[in-house]
Image (tube, rainbow, N blue to C red):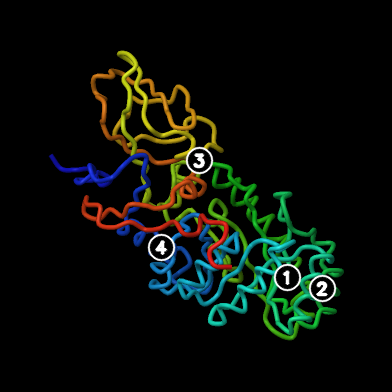
Amino acid sequence: MMKQWYEVANVDHIDSPALLVYPERITYNIRLLKKMVSEDTNRLRPHVKTNKMIEVCKMMMDAGIEQFKCSTIAEAEMLALSNAKDVMMAYQPVGPKIERWMKLVQAYPNTHFSCLLDNVDSIRELGFIAQNRKMNLSVYVDIDLGMGRTGSSVDQIERLLQCIEEQKHLVLEGVHGYDGHISNSDPEVREKESGVAYVLLKAAFDYLQPRCPYPLKMVIGGSPSFTSHAKRKDVTCSPGTFIFWDWGYRSRIPEQAFEYAAVLLMRVISVLDGRHVCVDLGYKAVASDPPLQRVLFLNADDATTVFQSEEHLVLSVGDSKRYPIGAVLYAIPTHICPTVALYDRTYVIQEHQNIATWQVIGRNRILNI
């Protein structure tokens, strides 16, 4: 009997719970991403918070992608270790992060780094330290596009520009906006909401560009809005989940035809009765931020979650005789990004064989700096 794409022939060598990744499917997703922007990789700045792996980042670089986005200094250093040319940290450095950011920029001169700023206090503090170090730092103004998490309002842009111009060692590269609040399953609604987000960012850009003697950039969006922003030739897009995809986005964004490229492996550890079994996939092994159901089972169509605890997941099934002790189940997480961060390594599957392991190095808070 022919194996399903996700099945592993030498599965007995993989302890569970485990995260499996499939390079051929990752390659397909990278190709589709490029196709959606007409092969213009200058319009892509993928977010690496989803994959957190040097090997995956290098796969994107081998495909001609040179710009990347990250959330942490450790992820930024991971990209530098991957020899990435251009790295934006979509986060505003505060406290000890400022010193770490300075050290990172100095330690990896072959990588161009930038970070976000959204208020005058942070601009002045970063500018003051950069001046004392005699370092030039690249920055983007972060604009709130409606998510209400970080970012300045557009009506503050004049004040922020004035403050940046007062800092001799800060170089403005452009504007950034994340519209993570856009996630409606109706593509027409998402199209409209993405348009509103774009108009906000464009207003900030249109104020700044005439006042700067060089071209500025606009970086916008995540995965749900990528369908719309990919059509705008004046912006750089920052999807991240595309690399592995997940059940949540497959359900809500069906027009983005990315393939599942990361799978959770688990085993039955207890048969409770004729209709219930327990597997070793607790919420320490899969993201717990979405409500139940947190996974889509690939080889257990009748399985639904009853409850979950730290190391256990109790399932209701049609007939527990189909799921003896040790039976291997495969599933797609609803939310892949925080799921990846729960694992220190992934198992690389090619032609149904586990051929290697990749370290999830970006899950660490600190690498070398």
Give the residue pinned by disc 1: 205
Name the N-terminal-most of marks 3 and 1: 1
Q: Residues within 10 Å of mark 4 (few under 14, many from 20)?
A: many
Residue 319 point in image, percent of width and height: 28, 18
Alpha carbon separation for disc pair 1 and 4:
32 Å
Amino acid type of the residue that numbered disc 1 sits on in the rendered structure? Phe
Q: Residue furthest front?
A: 368
The residue at 70%/82% (across/down) is: 136
The answer to which image quadrant residue 77 occupies is: bottom right
| Spatial CA span between label 1 and label 2 | 11 Å
- Res 56 label: 4
Identify the amino acid type marked 4.
Answer: Val
Contact between marks 1 and 2 (CB within 8 A): the answer is no
Relative to 190, is 318 above or below?
above
The amino acid beneath tag 3 is: Ala
Q: Secondary structure at mark 1?
A: helix
- What's under tag 2, amino acid-wise? Leu
Tell which tag, 2 or 3, sits nearer the viewer. Answer: 3
Disc 2/disc 3 C-alpha distance (Å): 39 Å
**Disc 4 on helix, strand or loop?**
helix
Label 1 Cα crowd, 10 Å radius (few <14 / some 14-19 / many 20+): many
Which residue in the protein does label 2 denote? 161
**What whole-number distance in Å separates the C-alpha atoms at marks 2 and 4?**
36 Å
Are discs 2 and 4 less than 8 Å apart at CB? no
Between disc 2 and disc 4, the foreground one is 4
The answer to whether 116 appears left or right of 23 in the picture is right
> Residue drawn 28% across and 19% down?
320
The numbered mark, 4 or 3, whose residue comes first in the sequence reads 4
The residue that mark 3 highlights is: 287
Q: Residues within 10 Å of mark 3 (few under 14, many from 20)?
A: many
* Front: mark 1 or 4: 4
- 46 is higher (above) or lower (below) than 212: above
